[in-house]
Image: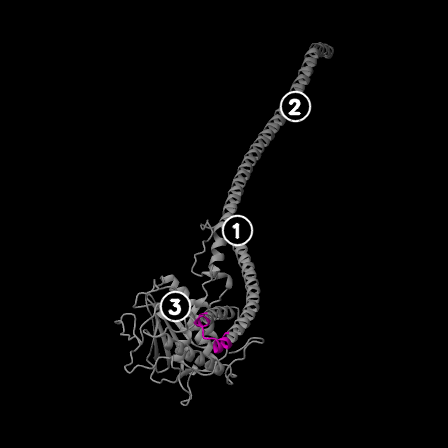
Amino acid sequence: MAEIVLALLAGAALTAAPLLWSTRRAVRTARAATRRATEADHRVQGAEVRARAAETRARENEEHARAAEARARAADARHTLAEDRLAAAVREFAHLAHERLPAAATALTHPRTPVPGPLDTTGGNEELHRALDAVLGAALRAALAERERTDAAARAALRGAASKIQALLIQVRSLLEEIQLSVDDPRLLALDFRNELTLRRVQSLAVLSGAWPGMTREDSPLAELCVGAQSRVAGYARIEITNHLREPRLAVAARAAEPVAIALAEILGNATAYSHPETRVVVAIEQGSSGALVVVDDMGVGMEPDQLERAAELLDGQAEVLLTELGDPPQAGFAVIGLLCRQFGFGCRVEPSPYGGVRAILRLPADLLTLTDPAAPLSALAPRPITQSTPVFDAGDALPTRKRRTPRVPQQDAPSPLPAPAGTTPDRARSAWSALQSGTAAGRSAAERPAGPQGPAAPEGVETP
């Protein structure tokens, strides 16, 4: 049995050996397939990982591309904004050069001139606006410094020229006085008159340049100062002076007498220059409770509101007066009056006149007024106070009644210092001229005496008649 079993087992073994080998081969094949499948799975997984990585890189690339496009758009926007800002800056600088700077330079002289601001006021250009304002401020400071330097040089040159010319004119006056005492020729009076007109112009230039007018006086009756100012004006024959003073000997103190005479001459010169040659210039001398007034009315063309404002600024004496800004030819009358008002303490203002032209009011405070010596004779040429005093009237009041003392004589080519009465014969005229020459010489001799303690000293080298 055992052998049979062994044989069977041997046969079975022999029969099972191929099957076992096949099984083993199948197992090996299965294992190899499993390995290949596993490797394939690994490859698939790797491929999936790589695919996911590729997708991630693709997404990243897309994001980079979108970021690059955004940066490109932002760069384009910044470039466009830069171009817009550059164009705006160019426009602002052109506006600054052609509009703002000229207007600001004009406003230095005429403060009411509007100065335009930046073109773009919507905001966002604050830094540019600050830079433009800094440029504008620096340019104005440089213009002011240059203007002051130029004006100072012009004043210095004008002072020197005015001093020399004034000295020569005073020498001419003295020579004419000597000739008039020995030669009886009315043409000498005409020459003396024109010399006085020239001297008045030079005095105005001296005041503008910051120099002393070059003359001193003693205490002078106000009425005589008005007549003296009248004699310095080319259109003197048209000027009618009415004296309303309560005190005939009311006088201007020595320290301010000549400045008041210069200011009155400038006022009368303006009144005659800007009114028709056949109209009158009416002057009223008034005495108030706190001083005196000289009211001058002309019948001229008047002044516009802006001209009145500018005149008020100049007459106030506080505004800066530059020689280069007085016009061409220079309009220096109000500037001269304003400087004298500030230096010597009197005042002046202008307003529309009820006569249709301009009214100028010269105000003399009480501290500039005094009374002359009762023993000293008053000038025969000065108007005497009238009995009924006419008060100073406002622009809305009726016109005052003025009485002319002597008939007016038309101004001739060779004017005399004062018009002669109508109907004068040649002999009377000769006697009147001689008396006038003697009186003029006596008056000037009296004026040559040294001024009182209050009188300012004249500049060196300038005679003080």
Q: Amino acid at mark 3?
A: Gly
Which residue is depicted at the point 61% across and 27% down? 45
What span is colored magenta in the figure? 176-190
Mark 1 lies on a secondary structure that is helix
Pointer 2 local density, CA inside 10 Å: few below 14, some 14–19, many at least 20:
few
Q: Is residue 406 visible?
A: yes
* Residue reaching furthest to the bottom: 375
Pointer 3 local density, CA inside 10 Å: few below 14, some 14–19, many at least 20:
many
Left/right placement of residue 64 relative to residue 185 reads right
Badge 3 or badge 1: first in the primary sequence: 1
- On screen, 362 above or below 19? below
Can you give x and y, in whole percent of width and height, for residue 256 in the image?
46, 79
Of the pair 3 and 134, the residue shown nearer to us: 134
Q: Which mark is residue 128?
A: 1
Badge 3 or badge 2: first in the primary sequence: 2
Which marked residue is nearer to the observer: mark 3 or mark 2? 3
Q: Amino acid at mark 2?
A: Glu
- On screen, 263 above or below 114? below
Mark 2 lies on a secondary structure that is helix
Left/right placement of residue 291 relative to residue 130 reads left
- Cα separation, mark 3 vs mark 2, equals 130 Å
- On screen, 177 above or below 73? below
Badge 2 or badge 1: first in the primary sequence: 2
Which residue is depicted at the point 69% across and 16% down? 24
Q: Which residue is mark 3?
A: 235
